[in-house]
C-alpha cells in the first residue's frame, strides 16, 4: 500500500509538469515552413534514441541537419503580386480546401514547380469574429493551402505563411457575397 502511494506521489508532479510544458503555446502570426529535402532512403533509427514518437502537441525545434542557422524568411514587403497564381477561397468558418479550389491549387503548384520563386501565402478572413479568432483561422487557411502545395511537390522551404485575419479585406461591403471574397488564401512571390 505504501509503495502505491509513493508511486502516485511521484507520478502526479510529472503529469502536472507535462501538462504545463505541453500547454497551448501561442502561435506566431508568421510561420516559415521547413522540411528536410528527401534523401531517397529512410533514416536509420539510432540505438540511443527511443523508438517512441514525440506527442503531437509538443512543438519540436526546427534545426537543419547541418547545424547552420536557418536564414530568416524574407519580409512580407519583399514579395510581389503575380497573375500566375490565383487565390483560393473558403467557406465560412472553414479552412478545408474545396474541390474547385483544389484545381486552382493544382495549377498554382504546376507553375511553382517550373519557377524557382519563393512564395508567401496570406491567410484572410471576413469581418465577422474577433481579431484573435480570425488571425488563427487565417493561419489555418494559409497552412492548409501550404500543405496542399507541398503534397503536390512544391518544396516546403520555399513557402512562408502569414495571417492577416480580417485586417486586409478585398471587399468592404457588409454582405455574404463580399465576405466570400475576403475568405481566401492569397499568393505573393519573390525571386530567389
Image (spheres, rainbow, N blue to C red):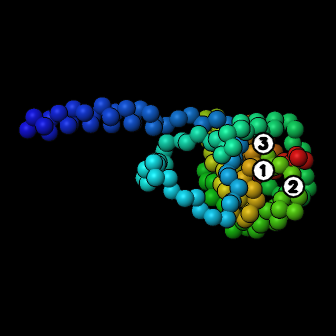
Q: Which quadrant would residue 79 be assigned to in this image?
A: top right
Q: Is residue 160 toward the left or the right of residue 113 in the image? A: left
Specify the label residue 158 is tagged with: 1
Q: Nearer the viewer, mark 2 or mark 3?
A: 2
Q: Position of residue 16 (x, y in %)?
A: 34, 33
Calculate the distance from the C-alpha at mark 2 to the C-alpha at mark 1: 8 Å
Front residue of this view, candidates 92 and 40: 40
Residue drawn 49% across the image and 37% down it: 24
Residue drawn 63% across the image and 64% down it: 41
Residue drawn 88% across the image and 58% down it: 115
Of pointers 2 and 1, the one earlier in the residue sequence: 2
The total of numbered circles placed on residues is 3
**Other residues around mark 1 within 10 Å, as few (<14) / some (14–19) / many (≥20):** many
Q: Which quadrant would residue 130 be assigned to in this image?
A: top right
Determine whether the residue tagged by mark 2 lies in a helix, strand or loop: loop
Q: Are marks 2 and 3 in contact (CB under 8 Å)?
A: no
The residue tagged 2 is 116
Please identify the residue farthest to the left as the structure is shown. 1
Of pointers 1 and 3, the one earlier in the residue sequence: 1
Residue drawn 82% across the image and 65% down it: 110
Of pointers 2 and 3, the one earlier in the residue sequence: 2
Q: Position of residue 148 (x, y in %)?
A: 69, 60
The residue tagged 3 is 169
Determine whether the residue tagged by mark 3 lies in a helix, strand or loop: loop
> Could you tell me which quadrant the N terminus lies in?
top left
Determine whether the residue tagged by mark 1 lies in a helix, strand or loop: helix
Calculate the distance from the C-alpha at mark 2 to the C-alpha at mark 3: 29 Å
- In the image, residue 127 above or below residue 20: below
Specify the label residue 123 is tagged with: none
- Is residue 71 at least partly visible in the picture? yes
Q: Are marks 1 and 3 in contact (CB under 8 Å)?
A: no
Q: Are marks 2 and 1 in contact (CB under 8 Å)?
A: yes
Amino acid at each position: 500500500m505504501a509503495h502505491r502511494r509513493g508511486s502516485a506521489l511521484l507520478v502526479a508532479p510529472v503529469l502536472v509538469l507535462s501538462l504545463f510544458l505541453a500547454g497551448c503555446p501561442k502561435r506566431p502570426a508568421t510561420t516559415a515552413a521547413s522540411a528536410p529535402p528527401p534523401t531517397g532512403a529512410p533514416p536509420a533509427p539510432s540505438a540511443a534514441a527511443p523508438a517512441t514518437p514525440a506527442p503531437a502537441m509538443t512543438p519540436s525545434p526546427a534545426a537543419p541537419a547541418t547545424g547552420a542557422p536557418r536564414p530568416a524568411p524574407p519580409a512580407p514587403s519583399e514579395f510581389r503580386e503575380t497573375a500566375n497564381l490565383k487565390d483560393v477561397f473558403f467557406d465560412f468558418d472553414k479552412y478545408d480546401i474545396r474541390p474547385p479550389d483544389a484545381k486552382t491549387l493544382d495549377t498554382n503548384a504546376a507553375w511553382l514547380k517550373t519557377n524557382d520563386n519563393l512564395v508567401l501565402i496570406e491567410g484572410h478572413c471576413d469581418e465577422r469574429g474577433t481579431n484573435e479568432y480570425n488571425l488563427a483561422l487565417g493561419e489555418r487557411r494559409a497552412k492548409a493551402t501550404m500543405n496542399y502545395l507541398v503534397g503536390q511537390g512544391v518544396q516546403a522551404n520555399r513557402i512562408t505563411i502569414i495571417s492577416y485575419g480580417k485586417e486586409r479585406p478585398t471587399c468592404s461591403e457588409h454582405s455574404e457575397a463580399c465576405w466570400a471574397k475576403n475568405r481566401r488564401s492569397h499568393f505573393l512571390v519573390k525571386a530567389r
